[in-house]
């Protein structure tokens, strides 16, 4: 998987693996990082089940979720996965609150989105609460546009999308 290591100006993104499990379990249990994610904070068993799903997605599609590190320290995750609500392949990102406010989520999410398009996904979507201004700024800042909305749990949810230019990418793999 070394071909899938992404480097940005400040970050290193590596495909999630069991070596990351302790760090990722802590991230997913952190309310500041994961409370607004679909399904909310995770316990250890849920984090492990998602790791299995993430590794399987990587094996099938050659892209997926990345661990985000700054100077060797895990600050979050980003990448694409198949949404459990059936809406399709979606970009997601979560970083610790102490790492927020410096553009790191945007930097990492942009790299992961480019990787997903290069792996063959011509359309990638993302979902954010309309009240989640930070996530909306990240998604808009990497070129994703609102294409629809829906209600979930009393919250207006915005659906963003990124569509690769025709001819630049392969067809979207069938899921």
Image (spheres, helix red, strand yellow):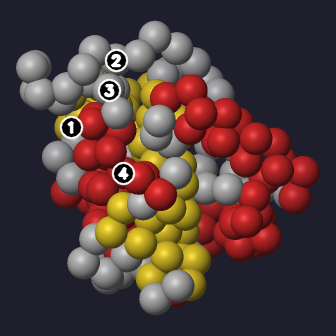
Q: Residues within 10 Å of mark 3 (few under 14, many from 20)?
A: some
- Where residue 45 appears, as percent x and y from the top left, is 90, 51
Q: Disc 2, disc 4: CB below 8 Å?
A: no
Q: Disc 1, disc 3: CB below 8 Å?
A: no
Q: Which residue is mark 2?
A: 172
Q: Which residue is mark 3?
A: 120
Q: Quadrant of residue 162?
A: top left
- Where residue 60 appears, as percent x and y from the top left, is 56, 27
Whether 145 is drawn above or below 97: the answer is above
Please report the residue visible at 12 percent of the width from the left and 27 percent of the height from the top: 168
Q: Residues within 10 Å of mark 2 (few under 14, many from 20)?
A: some
Is residue 119 in view? yes
Please report the residue visible at 23 percent of the width from the left and 42 percent of the height from the top: 144
Between disc 4 and disc 3, the foreground one is 3
- In the rendered structure, which disc, 1 or 3, sits on the residue that comes first in sequence? 3
Give the Cα separation between the discs numbered 1 and 3.
19 Å
Q: Tag 1's secondary structure? A: strand
Q: Tag 3's secondary structure? A: loop
Residue 112: mark: 4
Q: Disc 2, disc 3: CB below 8 Å?
A: yes
Whether 66 is drawn above or below 107: the answer is above
Please report the residue visible at 52 percent of the width from the left and 85 percent of the height from the top: 72
Between disc 1 and disc 2, the foreground one is 2
Between disc 1 and disc 3, the foreground one is 3
Is residue 157 in view? no
Residue 145: mark: 1
- In the rendered structure, which disc, 4 or 3, sits on the residue that comes first in sequence? 4
- In the rendered structure, which disc, 1 or 2, sits on the residue that comes first in sequence? 1
Looking at the image, which is closer to me, 155 or 6? 6
């Amino acid at each position: 998987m070394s071909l899938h290591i992404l480097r940005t100006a400040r970050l290193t993104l590596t495909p999630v693996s069991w070596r990351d499990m302790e760090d990722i379990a802590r991230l997913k249990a952190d309310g500041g990082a994961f409370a607004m994610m679909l399904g909310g904070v995770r316990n250890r068993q849920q984090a492990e089940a998602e790791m299995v799903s993430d590794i399987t997605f990587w094996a099938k599609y050659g892209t997926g979720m990345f661990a985000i590190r700054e100077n060797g320290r895990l600050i979050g995750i980003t990448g694409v996965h198949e949404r459990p609500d059936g809406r399709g392949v979606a970009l997601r990102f979560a970083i610790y609150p102490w790492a927020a406010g410096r553009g790191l989520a945007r930097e990492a999410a942009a790299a992961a989105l480019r990787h997903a398009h290069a792996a063959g996904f011509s359309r990638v979507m993302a979902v954010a609460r309309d009240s989640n201004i930070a996530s909306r700024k990240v998604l808009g800042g990497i070129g994703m546009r609102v294409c629809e909305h829906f209600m979930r749990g009393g919250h207006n949810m915005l659906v963003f999308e990124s569509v690769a230019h025709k001819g630049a990418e392969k067809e979207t793999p069938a899921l």
